[in-house]
Image (cartoon, rainbow, N blue to C red):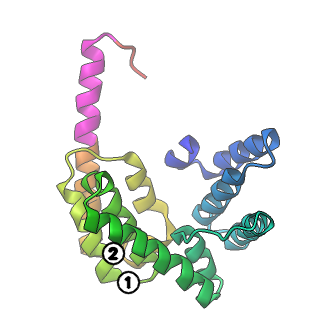
Amino acid sequence: MIERWQRNYKAEQEYIYKRWELDTSSTATYWSWISNYIYLNELDSAYQYLQLLEADRQRKGQNLTPHSIFGYVYMKLGQKSEAEYHLKGHLSYWKNNLKLKTPNTQKGTTYFWLGLIYSMMEDGPNTIKHLEYLKELSSLNSAYLTDLKDFPSFDIVRNTPEFQSIFKHLEKVYRKEHRKIARLLRKENYPST
């Protein structure tokens, strides 16, 4: 995942493959492949691994838990009922997090996921509405910036003034925090990277 958050999607594919060679039974590897293929806009390949993950669950007598990543693949490939199952199920999960005011909500994770899911559902106003909450954060997970830059579903809002305002604000928050950490590391005589 480190390669992904640094936007090195091809290198991430190589890492995933090496991880899979070490443990071919790990379904986490399927998740990684599905996600990374979405970043690469290779939805047919993402779908191939989604099918393998579903087959694995069926062999174990389990259902695949609704997840927006799966819903996005299904939606882009025109499989509406499967897309709705995953998108609406995952949306419900994060709305419940919001209602319960979980720690994820306080860290911005809930709002980020709600914005992401609404973008996958091609609902621009709700995408912006939920991403707007991220502006209240005093620290920021850099993965949000990567996803906002590269995750394809944000294409529906990426060029709007509202999205650009949110993104610029979040970049500023991240840079400020990054500089603060760099000063602390220098103060403690940590080597610079």
- Please name the residue shown 64% across and 69% down the image: 64
| Mark 1 element type | loop
**Which residue is farthest top?**
189
**Where does the C terminus fall, quadrant-wise?**
top left
* Residue 152 showing in the rendered view: yes
> x, y percentage for residue 54?
73, 69
Could you say which is closer to the camera, residue 186 or residue 136? 136
| Residue range (magenta) | 175-189
Please tell me whether residue 183 belongs to the stretch shown in magenta. yes
Q: Which mark is residue 165?
A: none
* Residue 164 showing in the rendered view: no
- Please name the residue shown 60% across and 89% down the image: 81
Please tell me whether residue 76 belongs to the stretch shown in magenta. no
Residue type highlighted by circle 2:
Thr
Characterize the local packing of mark 2: few (<14), some (14-19) or many (20 or more) Cα atoms within 10 angstroms. Answer: many
- Please name the residue shown 23% across and 48% down the image: 172
Q: Do labels 1 and 2 touch, CB within 8 Å?
A: yes
**Where does the N terminus fall, quadrant-wise?**
top right
- Please name the residue shown 38% across and 84% down the image: 123
Q: Main secondary structure of the magenta part?
A: helix
Determine whether, in the image, residue 125 is placed left or right of residue 62.
left
Mark 1 → mark 2, Cα distance in angstroms: 6 Å
**In this figure, which residue is indicated by the disc labeled 1?**
123
> x, y percentage for residue 129?
25, 74
**In this figure, which residue is indicated by the disc labeled 2?**
127
Residue type highlighted by circle 1:
Asp
> x, y percentage for residue 43?
67, 72
